[in-house]
Amino acid sequence: MTRNIYALLVGIDEYVSPVSALQGCVNDIMAVQEYLQGRVATDGHQLHLRTLLNQNATRQAIIDGFRQHLCQASSEDVVFFYFAGHGSQEEAPEEFWILEPDQLDETIVCFDSRSPGGWDLADKELAKLIAEVAAKNPHITMIMDCCHSGSGTRDLDGEIAVRQAQSDRRKRPLDSFINSIAEVNQLAASQSREENLSRWKFLQGKHIFLSACLNTELAKEYNGDGQRRGAFSYFLLDTLKKANGNLSYRDLFKRTNALVRSKVTAQSPQIQATVLGDLDQPFLGGAISEALSQGLIAPRTPYFTVYDHKDHGWVIDGGAVHGIPQPVDETTLLALFPFESSAEQLRQLSGAIAQAKVLQVLPQVSKIHISGIENLNPDTTFKAVVTSLPLPPKGVLITGEEAGVQLARTALLQAGPQSQPSLYIREVTTLEETEFQLVARDGKYFITRPADDRLLVAQIQDYTTATALQVIQRLEHIARWTNIVELSSPASSRIRPNAVQMVIEQNGQELQDVQLRLEYRQENNKWNPPSLRIKLKNTTHEPLYCSVLDLTDRYAVSADLFDGGGLWLQPGQEAWALGGDSISATVPEKLWWEQGITEVKDILKLIVSTAEFDATLLEQSELDLPSRSVSTLRGGKGTLNRLMNRIPSRDITAKPQEEELCDDWVSSQMTITTVRPQQTTLAPTPDASISLAAVATPIVNPTTNTTPAQATKPKWLIDMVIGGLAVFAMIGLLFWQHKSNDTQPSNQSFQSRVR
C-alpha cells in the first residue's frame, strides 16, 4: 500500500506594509522542497507538495492548505507543515484570556495579515487546524522558523533581520477567528501544567513540533552557503542532508540545537511532542526498527556512483541534497574504484584506480574532474568514496580604526606555518561571507559575530604587532572550536547515525530530554552541583572506535572523558566515561562569584569511526591561557585527521599510500546547560572544582559598557547585587577562610578532570 506524505510549505519574504521584509524565508522553503523531492524514498511512498510563497501565502490560502490538502492524510500517512516568516503577537479577545494570562495571542503573520480587514493566524487557530488534520490519526510534523515576542526589533547594527513583526494592537473581533468559544475552552483544558517554553498552544492531536527559539528570544537570519537563510532552518537542513538514512527527531534536534547555539547569540531551538517516545522515531515517521529498511528518507549506500552525464559530463550521484558541500577554497576529494568492488575493498585506498575532485555541486549530482585514467570510456561507471571534505577558512570582516586594521591584516597574512596566511581564517569584505567580526575601536580589538555586537572573548588593549598577532590567534582558536562543532558525518558514510548511543544518566535514570538542563540543588543548607554519568553503547555488529569531546562555552576542547582520548567498542559493548565515576556539571566560581553568570553550556561531541584516531589532537585550552604543544599527527589525510592538525590536502596525488585506509566515521552531539542559582548564601571554597571555561576578568561590551551578565539582568537586580556585594563579600571571605581547611570536592567536574 502506498504511504502518502502531504507537505504544506509556507515562506514569506515580501509583506504588505507596514510589516518589514525578510530575505531568507523563500530560500528556506525552496531548500526544504528540494530536500523532500530529492530524498523521500520513491518505493511505496508518494509525495504531495503544496508550496505557498510571498503573495500566495495569504491567511485564507494557508487555512485552505490545511483543510483541502493536509486533511487528506489518513492513519498511514504523514503530514508535514513548515513555516518560515514573521511571527508576532496580537491582543487576545477577553473570551481567550483563560488561555492567555498576558492577554496576547501568539501568531504567524501571513502575507496579507496587516492589510485592512486582514488578521494574523493565531496559535489557537492553528490548534484547530491541526486537530482537524489529526482526526484520521496521521503522523504530524510541524516546523516553524519565526519568533513572537512582539517587539519588532532588529539586531543592533541593522544588518541581520529577525523573524518577528510588531505586535498587532488592533482590537480583533471574536467572529474573525475560526474557533468557537467551546473549542477554546477545550484547548485550555488540554494544556499541560508544565511550562511550554515556546508558548505555541496546540490541541493534543498527536504531533511533533520544532520551533526556532524560546518565546523570549529572536529567530535570526543567517548567511549560509552564500545566501540569506534562517539560522534554524539552515542548520536543520544541513543536518538532514548530511545524514545517512533516517535521523530520529531526537538526534536531528540535538545537532541542530548545538549548531544554532554555537553560531547565533541568544537563540535556543525547541522541540515538543505529545508522546515523548515519538522523538525516537525517524524524521517524517516510521518505527525505529524500520528506519533503514522502510523509512521515508532513503538511506545512502557507502559510496557514490561515477558516470558520464549527458548534460554535465562526469558526475557523482550525490549533490546538495546529499550533503556535498560547495567548493570554496577547497573541495571534496574522492577515490575511484572498479564498480564491482566490495564494501571492504572500498576501504583500501591502495586499491583505488583513480582520484577525482568536485568542481560544482548541483541539487542531485556533482560535476567532477577525474585524474589517473587516460582515455576515459563514457560507458564506464565507477564507485567513489569521499577521502576528504573541504575545511575552508572562516571569513573575518575587519573594520574600524586604520592603525589597528592594518596591523591585524598583516598578522593574518603571517599567522600560518612558515609565516604563511592563516589556515583557519581569512579576511572577507561582505556580510554574506562573514563568520566573525574583528573591530578596532578606541585603541582596542573586539571580536564579535556579525549578527550582534556581543563580545566572544575579552577585548585586547592597544594596537601593536604583538596585540594584532594575539587577536588573530584568538580568532584561530575560536575557528578551530567552530570547526569541531560543525564537524558532521560524511555524506557517504555507511555507519548509521545511532550506531553508538551516548546515554546521559542521573540518579540511576537515563535522561530522555533532548535539551539537558541541569540545576544545582540545595541540601543541608548547601548548594550542590548536579552530577551525571555518560555511557556509550555500540549497537552495530562491527568494532567501532569512539571519542567524546567536551566543548565548553569558553572555546576549550577536551578529550579526557576516556583514557587516551578514545576507545574501541566491540559489537554490543558498553563503556562508561571516567570508568563510571560521577561527573559534576558546575558553574565556575570565577564566572558565578565574580561576574554573576548563572548558566554555562557544554557541547558533548561523539565521533565514531571504523579506524582509530587521536582525538587529543583536537584539544585546546580555554582562551587567554597558554596553548599546549601539539602532538604529531597519526593517521591518514582524511577530513577527521586534517581537522586535527589542519594539514590541507589540496592536490590529488598520483596514488594513495599502500597502508592508507578510507576511515569511515560519523558524529553526533548534545548540549548540556548547567544552572547555578543566584540567591545562594554560600561562599566558594578555594579548592572547589572548576568547570566550563572560567575567565578571570569580566568581558565588557564596547557599546553599552556592560558585561554579558549585566546585559541579561534587569537593572534593579544589577543595582541590588552591586549594592550588597561589599557586605556579602566580607562575610563570605571569613566563611571561606574558616572552611578552606576541611572542605573537599566529592565528585569530578567536567573541567577539573576533563580539562
Image (tube, helix red, strand yellow):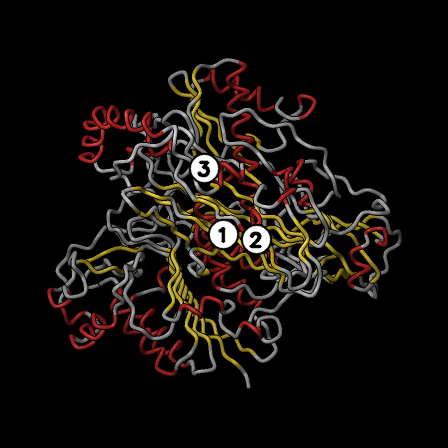
Image coordinates of residue 699 in percent, x first then y, are 37, 27
Q: Is residue 590 visible?
A: no
Q: Residue furthest right?
A: 374
Q: Is residue 618 left or right of residue 743?
A: right
Q: Position of residue 551 (x, y in %)?
A: 51, 41
Secondary structure at badge 1 equals: strand
> In the image, residue 553 lies at what x, y percent?
45, 39
For the residues bearing labels 3 and 2, Cβ distance under 8 angstroms: no
**Mark found first going from the N terminus, 1 or 3:** 1
Residue at 83% over, 51% down? 354
Q: What amino acid is at disc 2?
A: Trp
The span from disc 1 to disc 3 (Cα, nearest Å) is 16 Å
Q: Which residue is mark 1?
A: 533
Is residue 442 or residue 244 the one in the foreground? 244
Q: Residue 42: x percent and y percent?
A: 60, 75
Q: Which mark is residue 586?
A: none
Label 2 sits on residue = 576
> Alpha carbon of mark 3 to alpha carbon of mark 2: how far?
20 Å
Give amino acid for label 1: Arg
Above or below, 574 against 3 in this view is above
- On the picture, is 493 further left or further right than 483? right
Mark 2, Cα crowd under 10 Å, few <14 / some 14-19 / many 20+, is some
Q: Secondary structure at mark 3?
A: loop
Q: Quick one: label 1, few (<14), some, or many (20+) residues within 10 Å?
A: many
Above or below 285: residue 396: above
Would you name the residue on which mark 3 appears? 691
Q: Are marks 2 and 1 in contact (CB under 8 Å)?
A: yes
Residue at image position (33%, 36%) is 597
Residue positioned most to the left:
94
Does 215 appear above or below 721?
below
